[in-house]
Amino acid sequence: MQRLFSIFPQGLPGCGLALLRIGVAAAVVQQTADLDTPLRVAALLPVAALMAGLLTPWFAALGVALALLQAALGAFAPLPAAIAVFHAAALGLLGPGAYSLDARLFGRRRLTFPRP
């Protein structure tokens, strides 16, 4: 699973990635606002996963696909759809950051060996 992520930056870059995850999740909520209730409820899983940073590259790719589908169907204006696609693609390429479940589950570990 480590191959899906580059690194898990901490500090301000990690906070920036957390804000980007929240922004992409908000865009997914906006894109699904016009859908029927069952589809809107089904969209809560990717939104919750993005906000928590769980399997971020996969759910970011789902956000890209959703924005492209909405733009192709004419439900989204071209500029907001392009912004949503670029934000989700950036998140998928950058990774979740240190403040995410992905970092907790798949991040690098420090090994300590007892001295003989």
Image: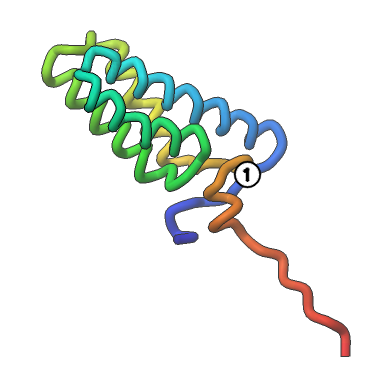
The residue at 17%/26% (across/down) is 69
Residue type at mark 1? Answer: Ala
Dot 1: what SS? loop
Tell me the quarter of the image containing the C terminus.
bottom right
Q: How is the image coloured?
A: rainbow
Q: Nearer the viewer, residue 74 or 82?
A: 74
Residue furthest out toward the front:
38
Q: Which of 37 and 81 is in front in this view?
A: 37
Position of residue 68 relative to residue 3, above or below, is above
Relative image position of residue 55 (x, y in whole percent)? 43, 47
Please tell me in which quadrant of the rendered image residue 39 appears.
top left
Position of residue 75 relative to residue 63, above or below, is above
Relative image position of residue 111 (x, y in whole percent)? 72, 71
Relative image position of residue 34 (x, y in whole percent)? 23, 13
Drawn side of residue 38 relative to residue 48, left or right:
left
Tell me the quarter of the image containing the N terminus.
bottom left
Drawn side of residue 19 relative to residue 89, left or right:
right
Drawn side of residue 42 relative to residue 75, left or right:
right
Label 1, residues with CA under 10 Å away: few <14, some 14-19, many ≥20: many
Drawn side of residue 22 relative to residue 13, left or right:
left
Q: Count every numbered label the image shows and give the total.
A: 1
The residue at 54%/58% (across/down) is 106
The residue at 34%/15% (across/down) is 30
Residue furthest out toward the right:
116
Q: Disc 1 designates what residue?
A: 98
